[in-house]
Image (tube, rainbow, N blue to C red):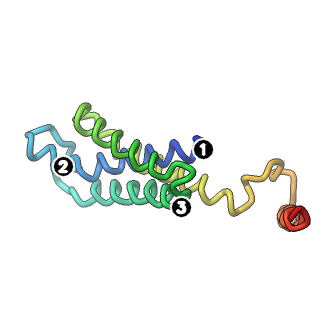
Amino acid sequence: MMVNNLFLLAIAASGWGLSLATYRFFARRYNWPMGALQADLPFIPILIGTVSLLCGLAFALLIGEDLGGWIIVGCGLLLGVFWTGFLRVGSQISLFLAPAAAFMLIIGWFSIPLGFGIEGWQNKTPTELLERSDRSSSRNDERR
């Protein structure tokens, strides 16, 4: 298992997204207070929550079981239950936290294939970045 920023952002996006997507259901059932957006336009928070939840789950699926995919799902579920069940009104802040976590997860996730995961990328041209990855793959072939 590898814990890094993307791992933690995936937990946050899935947990806050789950909380945001399900808060209206629990708020109506148990007569909890709701924000104006969740009361008047419920599809917007549900959409934001669902997209955030799917971003976290997609990242968990991508990294797989060996690197902690199930841990992301489990901790995200626990965060969502805690955030909705224990904090109740604190779930309103999920309107800001869920999309922020999902956005940062997507930016960090796509930075790796774009070459920003390589040390010293700021000082290299795109062709130098591509040459470096070609050399590293040829080194791996020589070692085999």
Q: Which numbered disc flags the more N-terminal residue, 3 or 1?
A: 1
Spatial CA span between label 3 and label 1: 13 Å
Image location (x, y in percent) of residue 15: 37, 45
Element class at badge 1? loop
Q: Is residue 128 visible?
A: no
Mark 1 and 2 residues: CB-CB less than 8 Å, in contact? Answer: no
- The answer to whether 61 appears left or right of 26 in the picture is right
**126 to 120, vertically: above or below:** below
**Dot 3 crowding, Cα within 10 Å, few <14, some 14–19, many 20+:** few
What residue sits right under mark 2 in the picture? 24
Image location (x, y in percent) of residue 30: 9, 40
**47 to 8, vertically: above or below:** below
Element class at badge 3? helix
**Residue 93 picture quarter:** top left
What residue sits right under mark 1 in the picture? 2
Residue drawn at x 41%, y 50% is: 73
The amino acid pointed to by label 1 is Met
Q: Which numbered disc flags the more N-terminal residue, 3 or 2?
A: 2
- Tell us which disc is closer to us: 3 or 2: 3
Mark 3 and 2 residues: CB-CB less than 8 Å, in contact? Answer: no
Q: Is residue 48 visible?
A: yes
The amino acid pointed to by label 2 is Arg
The quadrant in which the N terminus is found is top right
Residue drawn at x 86%, y 51% is: 123
What residue sits right under mark 3 in the picture? 62
The amino acid pointed to by label 3 is Leu
**Residue 11 picture quarter:** top left
Q: Which numbered disc flags the more N-terminal residue, 1 or 2?
A: 1
